[in-house]
């Protein structure tokens, strides 16, 4: 069974603007999918339907066989989302408290909460900053804190909306290492980005969105040519043809 099944999904905002138009998408567990497209193409709108932050105007979204409309809480446990603005996900006075916020709201036992927090801090390399205030963190560290907070909820699917936005080179490498490491550990990964060069070497599938529709869908080598037509910068590669050049090389 696919972990995500989207059938004829359309979404119209309260002002009448059509955000999505007839999306059909199946995702297998463990896939690494990059979504690209110009601003307003529907990338973030699509992702917000995966954990019921938005609900369909028509069509269905099923997560592990269950409609998000029927059980939005379950969808949010399976699908964790890291937003473009990390500060919007940071709500507590210390790093440790912030990572514990989600598990506490699941009403877990204290031992389980502490275990999850410890594991999330270790995975994201933030154990040494556990008692620090989030306000002193760099941009990359804040992004890793947002990831840790989501990891502590133990989702199977991780969604990253423009994860490299406003990060310098070291911060970008740190976050990229987190994302690729989570994929190697078996998580299903979605990443939206305007900068394919940073992530495309690790993707197994590339979706290009345009006007609320999926314009292209396939392995990057097959669909990347001519993406500038859709407002996406085509990655530069040092030799002719497609070559997967990782920022982690």
Image (spheres, helix red, strand yellow):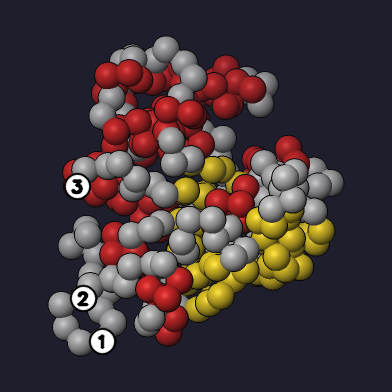
Comparing 223 with 176, the one in front is 223
> Does 2 sit left or right of 113 as displayed?
right
Residue 144 % position (x, y): 36, 36
- The reply to whether the C-beta atoms of the residues labelled 2 and 1 are less than 8 Å apart is yes
**CA separation, marks 2 and 3?**
18 Å
Placement of the N terminus among the 4 image quadrants: bottom right
- For disc 1, the neighbor class at 10 Å (few under 14, some 14 to 19, many from 20) is few
> Does 243 sit left or right of 133 as displayed?
left
Mark 1 secondary-structure assignment: loop
Residue 150 can be seen, yes or no? yes
Placement of the C terminus among the 4 image quadrants: bottom left
Position of 153 relative to 187 (above/below)? above
> Does 212 sit left or right of 55 as displayed?
left
Comparing 40 with 215, the one in front is 40
Identify the mark at residue 169; answer none if there is no mark: 3
Comes first in the chain, label 1 or label 3: 3
Which residue is at 16% across, 83% downward? 239
Position of 149 relative to 5 (above/below)? above
Which residue is at 31% across, 51% downward? 176
Identify the mark at residue 237; answer none if there is no mark: 2
Identify the mark at residue 61; answer none if there is no mark: none
Residue 125 % position (x, y): 30, 35
**CA separation, marks 1 and 3?**
26 Å
Mark 3 secondary-structure assignment: helix
Which residue bears the numbered disc 1?
Answer: 241
Judged from this view, the residue extending furthest toward the bottom is: 240
Comparing 81 with 18, the one in front is 18
């Amino acid at each position: 069974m696919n972990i995500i099944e989207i059938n004829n999904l359309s979404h119209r905002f309260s002002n009448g603007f059509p955000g999505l138009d007839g999306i059909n998408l199946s995702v297998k567990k463990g896939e690494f999918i990059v979504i690209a497209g110009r601003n307003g193409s529907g990338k973030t709108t699509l992702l917000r339907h995966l954990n019921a932050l938005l609900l369909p105007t028509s069509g269905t979204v099923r997560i592990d066989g269950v409609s998000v409309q029927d059980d939005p809480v379950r969808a949010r446990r399976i699908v964790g989302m890291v937003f473009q603005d990390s500060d919007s996900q940071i709500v507590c006075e210390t790093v440790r408290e912030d990572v514990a916020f989600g598990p506490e709201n699941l009403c877990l036992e204290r031992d389980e909460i502490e275990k999850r927090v410890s594991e999330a801090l270790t995975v994201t390399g933030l154990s040494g900053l556990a008692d620090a205030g989030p306000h002193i963190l760099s941009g990359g560290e804040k992004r890793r804190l947002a990831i840790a907070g989501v990891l502590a909820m133990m989702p199977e699917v991780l969604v990253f909306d423009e994860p490299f936005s406003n990060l310098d080179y070291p911060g970008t490498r740190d976050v990229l290492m987190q994302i690729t490491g989570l994929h190697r550990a078996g998580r299903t990964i979605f990443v939206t980005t305007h900068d394919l060069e940073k992530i495309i070497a690790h993707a197994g599938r590339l979706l290009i969105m345009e006007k609320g529709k999926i314009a292209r869908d396939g392995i990057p080598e097959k669909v990347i040519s001519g993406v500038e037509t859709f407002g996406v910068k085509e990655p530069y590669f040092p030799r002719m043809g497609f070559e997967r050049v990782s920022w982690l090389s």
